[in-house]
Image: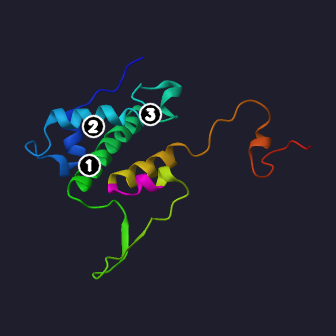
Amino acid sequence: MNCIQYNDQYFRSQFPSFANVCKYPTAIIQTFFNTATLYINNRAGGCFCGGMNLKRQTFALNAMTAHLLYLNDLIASGDVPAITTGAGVDKINVTIEPPPARNQWQYWLQTSPYGMALLALLQVATVGGCYLGGAPETAAFRRIGGLVF
């Protein structure tokens, strides 16, 4: 089974904000791509990719790489990957509100625009599921044909 490898030209064309080779050397992006494979499997096809085709899976890996690079830049600049709803000056009060998310995974992905694109892709790619055997009537919300139970 083949593995999806990092393609520098393709990544930079998908995410132009990382096109600056001086700021984002290929070796650094390659390192973040390798980290992204811990979250998104890079084995092409089969049951390892969650039902995604090669194009979707490659985008998912690149979006995760961009998400990790974005968060790295955010943290390096001293920012917090969260929504600030209030601030103070004397005795320093800061109020942070997390984006609406069902779980910590969704919250983490919503901290960057690339993570939000990845989350949307993963939700689209995993909708439905597989239907194996039996009458098609049992897979529908209502009866769709001539079978009577």
Density class for disc 3 (Cα within 10 Å; few <14, some 14-19, many ≥20) is few
Residue nearest the viewer, comparing 126 with 86: 86
Please provide percent x and percent y for residue 37: 37, 32
Question: Which residue lies most toward the right here?
Answer: 149
Res 53 label: 3
Task: Please state if 100 lies on the left or on the right of 129 as rendered.
Answer: left
What's the coloring here?
A: rainbow
- Position above or below: 14 against 103: above
Question: Which residue lies most toward the front here?
Answer: 91
Q: Secondary structure at mark 2?
A: helix
- Residue at 33% of width from left, 34% of height from top? 35
Density class for disc 1 (Cα within 10 Å; few <14, some 14-19, many ≥20) is few
Discs 2, 1 touching: Cβ within 8 Å: yes
Give the magenta part as a residue range.
107-113
Density class for disc 2 (Cα within 10 Å; few <14, some 14-19, many ≥20) is many
Q: Which residue is mark 1?
A: 72
Question: Label 2 is placed on what type of residue?
Answer: Phe
- Residue at 33% of width from left, 52% of height from top? 114
Question: Label 1 is placed on what type of residue?
Answer: Asn
